[in-house]
Image (tube, rainbow, N blue to C red):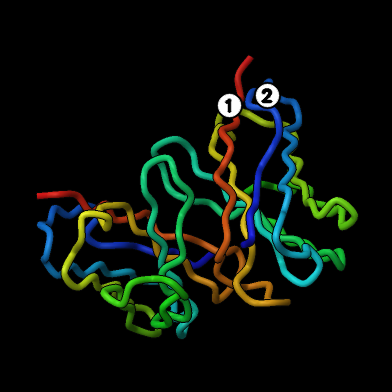
Amino acid sequence: QVQLQESGPGLVKPSETLSLTCTVSGDSIGSYYWSWIRQPPGKGLEWIGFMHSRGSTKDNPSLKSRATMSVDTSKNQFSLKLSSVTAADTAVYYCARHLDVDTALDSFDYWGQGTLVTVSS
Amino acid sequence: DIQLTQSPSFLSASVGERVTITCRASQGISSYLAWYQQKPGKAPKLLIYSASTLQSGVPSRFSGSGSGTEFTLTINSLQPEDFATYYCQQLKSYPVTFGPGTKVDIK
């Protein structure tokens, strides 16, 4: 059974960098694309970006190049850094696996439970 | 970006009813559409992909249809565990976008 678990600080100060890690168990991180999605409290879902262990990444232009994604295959983890955060970045952040092997534009079949990150001084 | 709208944004229904939710895309997306169910405090759950393919393990009372710009999610015989918010998602082009959601509540 594939499981994803987000981890990272729950509180980040404005203008600082938000850092999250997603640890994958039950599957190798190597064959799939993996995405980050966020959801502000009481609002809808926003795709942040995806990455693949081969190094390809793509992020949502709405984030104005503030998102950086990376992978650590030795730990079966992938990470998100979001720079220059503001209160508007307060959200539950989810990591998720793409449905099909090696498919970038894809739906998400496995999700982490989500982690709330609050941006506040 | 491809914009998705959903209607209604909220609906109240009874157990056993048939429910239909519509998702419209701002431009044609062929069948590159997925549907998710989200319950409070939980991650979204994939129900339907490629507009009409039922994800493994999802009850057959859920079905999806449509192509191009108009899509529907139908729940036949609504069950108590189906009360949730439903989102559509387009996978035709970047950035991937989601609809604003439809909350299904108990009448």
Question: In percent of the image, x 76 and y 31: which residue is there?
Answer: A17
* Quarter holding residue A30: bottom right
Mark 1 packing: few (<14 Cα in 10 Å), some, or many (20+)?
A: many
The residue nearer to you, when weighing A4 against A41, is A4
- Residue visible at 12% across and 59% down in the picture: B15
Left or right: residue B5 versus residue B17 is right
Does the CB distance between marks 1 and 2 fall below 8 Å? yes
Nearer the N terminus, badge 1 or badge 2? 2
Q: In this view, does B57 lie to the left or right of B93?
A: left
Q: Residue A48 at x, y = what percent? A: 63, 52
| Element at label 1 | strand
Asked if residue A60 can be seen in this view, the reply is no
Q: Mark 2 highlights which residue? A: A12
Q: How many marks?
A: 2
What residue is pinned by disc 1? A118
* Element under disc 2: strand
Say what amino acid the circle numbered 1 marks.
Answer: Thr
